Image: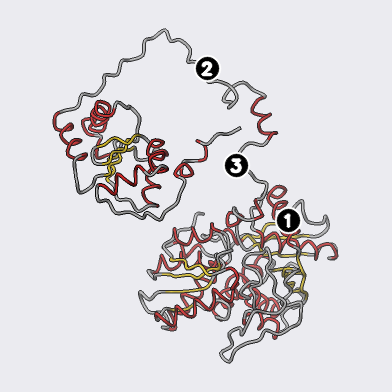
Amino acid sequence: MTAKFDNVLGTIGDTPLVRLTKLAPRLVNVFVKLEAFNPMGSVKDRLALGIIEDAERRGTLRPGQTVIEATSGNTGIGLAMVCAVKGYPLVVTMAENFSIERRKMMRFLGAKVVLTPAALKGSGMLAKAVELANAHGWFLCRQFENEANADIHSRTTAQEILSAFEGERLDYWVTGCGTGGTLKGVARVLKAQRPQTAIVVCEPDNSPTLGSGIAQARDADGSPADSHPSFRPHLMQGWTPDFIPKLTEDAVTLKLIDKIVPINGVDALRCARELARVEGIFAGISGGATLAGALQVAASAPAGANIVCMLPDTGERYLSTPLFDGVGADMTEEEVDISRSTPSARFDASVPAPAASTTAPPTLSEPVATTQVADFVARVLSDAEQPLVLFALEWCEFCWAVRKLFAQCKIPYRSIDLDSAAYQRNDRGGQIRAVLRERSGSKTIPQVFVGGEFIGGATETFDAFRDGRLQALLTQRGVLFDESVRVDPYSLLPGWIHPRR
């Protein structure tokens, strides 16, 4: 039966456990918990809901107050969803070296993203969040130390695992370690109710902050005093910040961890790729890393053992990272050969002329522009208040490339979208095109005019921008724009337009 929810927040949690049928050893059961099934695609959706609703109950988050948090991305995406539903403005601080997809998703959901220098690492973005919260009176989530982070995993993630293995053995639970919320929240429940379950924590082999045994230096308020001495930059985004979070330290102090497994970045990439290509499961680098740890455990586990491995997010968060190195947008040699194995729809063959028809095609009469339409075009092109005019189609990619150029340079313009609903009655859009053909001698769209002077279509406009003619015309007409922008306008065209093999 399909469930119904009052809003998207009701879909958080209750993610599936899936047994691996090919990657795991034959006599051992490895189950992966697919946190990508959360609505924003990661385990951090749980954290976001837990922290915000806890703050609401405690009264520490006021209606309409701005929420702020430091995040590598997934927490910010989850918070952006929760804040969108509940009506809180959101600002996130994020080190510049985390994947671009994450910051775009947060901004798409309405959040503001403040980037911090990569050289300052996780502690830099955390310090910036604290500074902004104190300066503006914003609510700081404090995901690395907020007990609400661990609590929601005790209430949801742990209970889902226990329910799935009711009446069955559960030998190992394998997780990575980011904020420590999943680790502390799940591990304390399993230790209480399934003490025979071994808790296995994975961390980067080149950044063994837990495995080093060195305690985290802290200021009087409990915040990290400095980067942990064993921290090194690593591949697994969301894992192991440059300090040991308070929630992680709690798990160590409470002796919840049975084993720490170091994971090599190459193994993390390999496992993420194999997971996709062999099991059909799309996970990120941190998921591949956790699976690498689970497979290490499985290699020496007794026959019949059940292992649960956390997969924190989806691979879509990593399109711009090394996970997708070698995955091209253009056809490979093998794909070209497949294309050439049959004659049609090939890039190396001319398009055949259409077969002759025994039935004459209907003759379409050219629209005849009324005086009113001709006058409308004349008024638009002579409007001194808005000298730059773009005659366009709403969803034409060439038109959108021109719009992108104007937007990047903050150039004000008027757009007449000839195929929009506003210009459909009496084929008003077609009549305007007839007037433009008469005026410019061109049938193509877009058409760009400055002060009534025809510049041309997309390529002519780009060329005019490249050589400075467009900017000079705009300046002559008193149009203010950002003259500091340096962009190759041809880079704004869609990829399929560029030459391909």
Question: Does dot 3 land on a helix, a strand or a loop?
Answer: loop
Q: Amino acid at mark 2?
A: Pro
Label 2 sits on residue: 352
Query: Are the two marked residues, 3 and 1, in contact with CB atoms closer than 8 angstroms?
Result: no
Q: Could you tell me which residue is drawn at 53 percent across and 66 percent down?
A: 45
Position of the C terminus by quadrant = top right
In the visual, does 209 lie left or right of 178?
right
What is the C-alpha distance between the residues marked 3 and 1? 22 Å
How many discs appear? 3
Q: Position of residue 484 (x, y in %)?
A: 40, 56
Quadrant of the rendered image containing residue 246? bottom right
Q: Amino acid at mark 3?
A: Ala
Mark 1 neighbour class, 10 Å CA radius: few under 14, some 14 to 19, many 20 or more: many
Q: Position of residue 296 (x, y in %)?
A: 80, 63
What is the C-alpha distance between the residues marked 3 and 2? 27 Å
What is the C-alpha distance between the residues marked 2 and 1? 46 Å
Quadrant of the rendered image containing residue 162? bottom right
Q: Earlier in the sequence, mark 3 or mark 1?
A: 1
403, 90: nearer the viewer:
403
Label 3 sits on residue: 329
In the visual, does 464 lie left or right of 205?
left
Question: Does dot 2 land on a helix, a strand or a loop?
Answer: loop
Q: Amino acid at mark 1?
A: Cys
Q: Earlier in the sequence, mark 3 or mark 2?
A: 3
Instruction: Say the numbered circle drawn on residue 271.
Output: 1
